Image (cartoon, grey):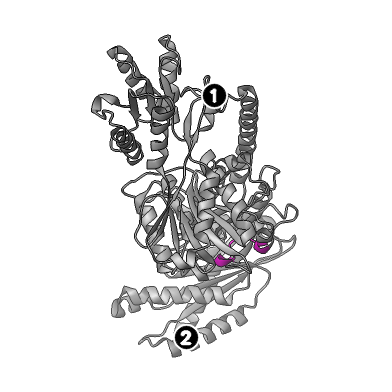
């Protein structure tokens, strides 16, 4: 619950499909006045039962916040993945939330399903009782498919009720598709034993059967009547119009509301509720019911959809190309400011596109409720928007405003090469199909754009790391000779006119003795300590390099005091040796050379001049022992 609104999480697939879109629209109309709001967790495509890796679209379910969810509706018939459905049920039960499954019976759940058996039985009875037909043929779907079997069993049951034969000769299989249905109908005609009516398990097969009959000069329904099932939109434009069984979204939404109002009473019980189907009486059964609609109006509307989608595809491709050229998330957000991206926000895993986008281990880490996300884009703030961090539990900005205005929140996962990136949330002010159709189009474009941006940032970071590997010494982290020469050249090009350079040479004393007596690991320790001292005791901006085994050099712009540098090194290693816990002391000889004004020295000259002074210091130190 958020404020005074009860939150219903609806898990669906392909919200852009007519049936799913209509159900969500009708459900929102029905529940909004009763204080409910819908959070829809959608996958753009249906992924059937598979083995191996989980489809990354299903990561959207990981963002469901059960702390605010009051009930979960799982649309099993469109998700079509038993493992995912079982996991969603398990998660909801673990959090103590009631579950409504639109599909098959699940223990401990409230199940709502269309009354398939009686719906098709009503069609068979209509043909027998109203049209007095006794020679009926059933065009089934895929053999063994549960929906086809429901309708086949209803067909046989009604025939038996009326004492009519229900043998296999009265059954064909059209596999729910046009081609197989046409082939099956050709075989029926070729047999010479035409039925009075062909009752099809779906509308698409009914359309195919009508087409074959008409090609053979047979009239529908005068010679052979035909009926369908599902009530798809295309049957409104067939001539003659096909009689069908309608799975009405409004009826299903009404049944859902009825169950929601009893949710606390039903919670934990295993109950099944049936949503009625209704006959859509038209011409192909021999009745004069609903007539064919004007196809040109529908075609004009569909053409508008297609042209709009094509234009939006071009715009989204341009946005994707621009995002791929971005160097930071602020630029990404700027490129997303486009009229096509409206009524939506984009929330991503902070590490996925943030400063660490190119580092290892990016993605979802830590406890979900403690993670921070990045609000990458919010269409409600078109001007001067800058991405900012949000707690993962915040879901979307200005959520209360959306709930107060009865907006449906539709969440889609963002993912790239199997890695979850976050989600995009659509909160359209108008629940029309045109808006819903753009959801997969937009989500897929953002997958490519943001995922590609991240990949390019990773490639850039990897290139930088490789360059650093070639420029730096592995043991000390200082520049190696190759890296130092390049940076030194830049220093000379940019130093102020008339400036002088100071060169500090540091040479580790007695390295051979340390290696021989204590081992090379301790020798490396002493070299590393010398490098840290050189970095710590040279001015900011100095370039430090290890150019030999125990020889290191720093160069900086400006004049440094040789005596001061030497004193600082002596004090540094006096403290270091007192606290190192080693059996030996680390000692360093230091030489300092200061150039004349605008004097330019090559690397070898730097080494030669400072080396002379350093060896003089080394000789002096040895003589004082």
Crowding at mark 2 (Cα within 10 Å: few <14, some 14-19, many 20+): some
Which residue is painted at 44% across and 73% down in the image? 528
Q: What x and y, as percent, mark residue 563?
A: 61, 81
Q: Is residue 426 visible?
A: no
Using the image as rendered, state which of residue 420 and residue 544 is in the foreground.
Answer: 420
Residue 552 painted magenta: no
The residue carrying mark 2 is 576
Q: Position of residue 108 (x, y in %)?
A: 37, 63
Residue 560 visible in the displayed image = yes
Nearer to us in this view, 237 or 463: 237
Q: Quadrant of residue 267?
A: bottom left
Tag 1's secondary structure?
A: loop
Read off the magenta span.
391-400
Residue at point 43% right, 43% down?
Answer: 46
Residue to which mark 1 is pinned:
288
Side of 170 relative to 203 (left or right):
left
Horizontally, residue 159 falls left or right of residue 624, namely left
Marks 2 and 1 close (CB-CB < 8 Å)? no
The quadrant of the image that shows the N terminus is bottom right
> Percent position (x, y) of residue 54?
38, 51
Answer above or below: position of 355 versus 580: above
Image position of 162 with respect to 536: above or below: above
Q: Position of residue 525 (x, y in %)?
A: 39, 76
């Amino acid at each position: 619950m958020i404020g005074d609104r009860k939150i219903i999480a609806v898990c669906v697939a392909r919200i852009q499909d007519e049936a799913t879109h209509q159900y969500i629209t009708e459900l929102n109309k029905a529940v909004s006045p009763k204080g409910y709001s819908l959070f829809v967790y959608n996958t753009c495509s249906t992924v059937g039962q598979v083995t191996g890796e989980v489809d990354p679209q299903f990561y959207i379910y990981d963002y469901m916040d059960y702390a605010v969810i009051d009930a979960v509706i799982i649309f099993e018939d469109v998700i079509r993945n038993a493992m995912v459905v079982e996991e969603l049920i398990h998660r909801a039960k673990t959090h103590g939330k009631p579950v409504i499954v639109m599909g098959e019976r699940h223990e401990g759940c409230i199940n709502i399903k269309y009354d398939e058996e009686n719906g098709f039985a009503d069609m068979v009875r209509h043909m027998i009782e109203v049209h007095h037909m006794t020679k009926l043929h059933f065009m089934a779907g895929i053999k063994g498919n549960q929906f086809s079997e429901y309708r086949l069993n209803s067909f046989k049951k009604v025939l038996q009720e009326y004492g009519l034969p229900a043998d296999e000769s009265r059954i064909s299989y059209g596999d729910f598709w046009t081609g197989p249905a046409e082939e099956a109908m050709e075989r029926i005609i070729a047999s010479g034993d035409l039925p009075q009516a062909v009752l099809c398990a779906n509308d698409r097969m009914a359309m195919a059967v009508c087409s074959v009959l008409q090609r053979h000069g047979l009239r529908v329904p005068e010679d052979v009547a035909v009926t369908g099932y599902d009530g798809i939109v295309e049957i409104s434009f067939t001539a003659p119009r096909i009689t069908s069984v309608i799975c009405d979204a409004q009826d299903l939404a009404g049944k859902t509301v009825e169950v929601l109002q009893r949710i606390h009473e039903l919670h934990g019980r295993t109950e099944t509720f049936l949503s009625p189907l209704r006959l859509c009486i038209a011409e192909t059964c021999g009745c004069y019911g609903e007539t064919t609609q004007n196809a040109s109006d529908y075609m004009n509307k569909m053409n508008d959809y297609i042209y709009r989608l094509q234009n939006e595809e071009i715009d989204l491709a341009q946005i994707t190309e621009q995002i791929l050229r971005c160097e930071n998330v602020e630029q990404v957000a700027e490129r997303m400011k486009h009229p096509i991206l409206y009524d939506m926000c984009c929330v991503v895993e902070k590490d996925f596109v943030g400063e660490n986008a190119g580092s290892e281990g990016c993605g979802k880490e830590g406890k979900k409720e403690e993670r921070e996300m990045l609000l990458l884009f919010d269409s409600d703030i078109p001007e001067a928007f800058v991405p900012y961090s949000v707690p993962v539990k915040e879901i979307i900005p200005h959520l209360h405003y959306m709930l107060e205005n009865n907006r449906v929140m539709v969440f889609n996962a963002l993912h790239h090469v199997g890695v979850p990136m976050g989600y995009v949330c659509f909160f359209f002010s108008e629940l029309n199909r045109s808006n819903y159709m753009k959801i997969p189009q937009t989500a897929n474009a953002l997958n490519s754009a943001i995922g590609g941006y991240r990949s390019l940032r990773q490639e850039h970071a990897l290139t930088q790391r490789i360059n650093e590997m070639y420029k730096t010494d592995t043991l000390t982290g200082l520049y190696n000779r190759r890296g130092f020469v390049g940076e030194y050249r830049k220093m000379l090009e940019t130093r102020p006119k008339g400036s002088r350079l100071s060169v500090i040479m540091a040479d580790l004393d007695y390295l051979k003795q340390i290696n021989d007596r204590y081992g090379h690991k301790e020798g490396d320790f002493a070299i590393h300590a010398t490098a840290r001292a050189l970095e710590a005791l040279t001015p900011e901006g100095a370039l430090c390099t290890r150019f030999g085994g125990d020889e290191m050099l720093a160069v900086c712009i400006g004049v440094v005091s040789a005596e001061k540098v030497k004193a600082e090194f002596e004090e540094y290693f006096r403290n270091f040796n007192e606290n190192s816990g080693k059996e030996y002391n680390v000692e360093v000889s230091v030489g300092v050379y200061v150039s004349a004004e605008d004097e330019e020295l090559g690397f070898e000259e730097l080494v030669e001049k400072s080396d002379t002074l350093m060896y003089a210091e080394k000789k002096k130190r040895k003589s004082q022992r």
